[in-house]
Image: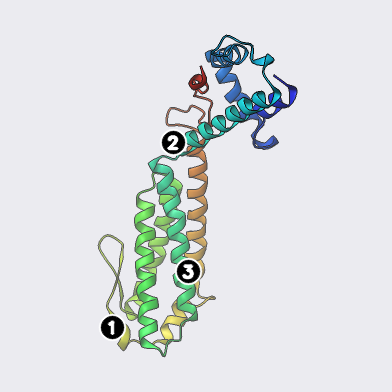
Amino acid sequence: MSSINIANFFSSGGSSSGSVNWLSDYASIKSGSYYKLMKAYYKGSDGTSAAAKSSGASTSIAQKLIDEKRSAQTAAKEKTESSSVKAYNKVQSTVGAAMDSVKKLQSTDVTDEEATAKAVSSFVKSYNEMKDAAAGAADASVSSRMDSISKLVKSNEKALNGLGISIGDDGGLKLNEDTLKAADKGQIGNLFGKDSSFTKGLTTSAQMMSGNAQYAASRELLYGSSGTYNAAGTSSGSLFNGFI
């Protein structure tokens, strides 16, 4: 095999993924797959030496191996994205939606009753989705942050009630639009304004919860439930058996 093919075969992803590639290659060598690969390369199915074939054919074979290796690594990565990783990703997306709803409230003209009702309803909905997403994430740091947010909401229950927002037995929010229509709309700015303690506390805790979820997802991708390393390709000793 030419030096350029060898270099292409054992390189991918740059220096930051060098250790992962080394472990993947080591796994294939240890299992005997690499030996089978080399044996198959130097002896084609017709009994002729692959080295005797044209350089164009050699390049084609090497490229096929590279493409298959990348495909296997992609499949391994997707497989490691377990339900818990999806749960952590959902926490991050719902936090983003909740923060967007707060910004929408801040920019809404409170004299427009329909727009105001829509903005408040969006906040209530996105808050509940964020709360449910946090409950579905099995990480203590995420749960702890959501507990802090729930306590913040509870401490501002009176102000929320004044806008028709009540707290249910499960900690979720409910909106009574009739109460909101009759409420002093100036209270929206007092509660959800950029400088209000409620908004600052909510934003800070939510962003930290999102960060906790992101870290937990990264940890889940690196290590399995048994503590084994989940780097793509390292557990696939038969990676190249399809070519044998």
* Nearer to us in this view, 183 or 223: 223
- In this rendering, position of residue 152 left or right of residue 173: right
Q: Nearer the viewer, mark 1 or mark 2?
A: 2
Instruction: Tell me residue 8's x, y (percent).
Output: 68, 29
Tag 1 near tag 3, CB within 8 Å: no
**Residue that carries the numbered disc 2 in the rendered image:** 79
The amino acid on which the numbered mark 2 sits, given as a three-letter code, is Lys
Mark closest to the chain's N terminus, 1 or 2: 2
Instruction: Tell me residue 242's x, y (percent).
Output: 48, 22
| Disc 2 packing (10 Å; few <14; some 14–19; many ≥20) | few
Tag 2 near tag 3, CB within 8 Å: no
Q: Secondary structure at mark 2?
A: helix
Instruction: Tell me residue 205's x, y (percent).
Output: 49, 60
Instruction: Tell me residue 228's x, y (percent).
Output: 49, 26
Residue drawn at x 57%, y 16% as measured from the top left? 37
Q: Quadrant of the N terminus?
A: top right
Q: Which mark is residue 100?
A: 3
The amino acid on which the numbered mark 3 sits, given as a three-letter code, is Asp
| Disc 1 packing (10 Å; few <14; some 14–19; many ≥20) | some
Q: Nearer the viewer, mark 1 or mark 3?
A: 3
Mark closest to the chain's N terminus, 1 or 3: 3
Distance CA(mark 2)–CA(mark 3): 31 Å
Is residue 206 something that shows in the picture?
yes
Q: Secondary structure at mark 3?
A: helix
Mark closest to the chain's N terminus, 2 or 3: 2
Q: Which mark is residue 179?
A: 1
